[in-house]
Amino acid sequence: MAAMAGLIALLSLFLAAPDRRLAIDPAHSLVTATVSFFGFAKKTARFPKVEGSADVVGDDVRLDVRLDAAALVASDSVTERRLKGEDFFDVAHHPVVRFVGAGLHATGSATGTIEGNVVARGISRPARLDVRFSRPIETLAAAGAFHVSAVTEIDRRDFGMTAYPLIVGRRVRIAIETDLQPSA
């Protein structure tokens, strides 16, 4: 019953008309995914093609971020090919990675968390973004652009990415840096 009430509350947020609609500025966005490598080093992939939107409804933010997994860039061609292949993102069948969330819970004047779901390889799993805004939360509905920094951590195995378990760590830190611009 509590799950149903939570679903209804989340749906009501998505159905409410936004006070303000913003778009992710792809030219001022960077999304990275970092994983441990051999237990002591790290590998990072960048997602240079980012799009999406944020709707401000009162003191809440509904967020929809889409990454073009087929455009991901890694530090070397072998890693990049493997990440795009069937063992990881399988971009031939699942070219988009997405985060959709709502329900901003303030943890400070310009920080909070947003609950939602990450969708990768056609699999959806809950995730919480820890977010930091470049200005106080109560001013997000006011005119002007602002910057958002967000991080989450997922277990790659939850998305069917189980290859190389002794080499590649299971925890993946995803970091989003983006500017949100007023949208028509």
Image: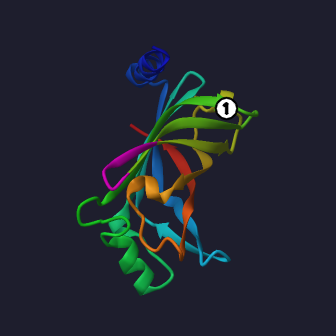
Reply above or below: 154 against 34: above
Tell me which corner region of the image, top left, top right, bottom left or bottom right, holds residue 8: top left
Q: Please give left or right for residue 76 compared with residue 108 in the image.
A: left
Q: Quadrant of the N terminus?
A: top left
Q: Residue furthest left?
A: 93
Q: Is residue 184 visible?
A: yes
Q: Which amino acid type is shown beneath numbered disc 1?
A: Ile
**Residue 37 is a magenta residue:** no
82 w.r.t. 68: above or below = below
Q: Residue at x 61, y 33 (%)?
A: 140
Q: Residue at x 67, y 36 (%)?
A: 112
User: Which corner quadrant holds the C terminus?
Assistant: top left
Q: Is residue 87 left or right of residue 20?
A: left
The residues colored magenta run: 120-125
Residue at image x 33%, y 67%? 70
Where is residue 68 drawn, in percent x and y? 36, 61
Residue where numbered disc 1 is placed: 137
Q: Secondary structure at mark 1?
A: helix
Q: Is residue 63 visible?
A: no
Dividing the picture into quadrants, the one containing residue 93 is bottom left
For label 1, the crowd category at 10 Å Cα-Cα, with few meaning under 14, some 14 to 19 and many 20 or more, is many
User: Most prominent secondary structure in the magenta stretch?
Assistant: strand
Residue 8 or residue 178, whichever sits in front = 8
Q: Position of residue 63 (x, y in %)?
A: 48, 38
In the figure, residue 110 lies in which quadrant?
top right
Q: Position of residue 139 (x, y in %)?
A: 66, 30
- Give 159 or 49, whichever is nearer the viewer: 159
Q: Nearer the viewer, residue 15 or 88?
A: 88
Query: Could you say where residue 83 lies in the image, as x and y percent from the top left?
Result: 40, 72
Indicate left or right for 50 with 70 as reference: right
* Count of labels in the image: 1
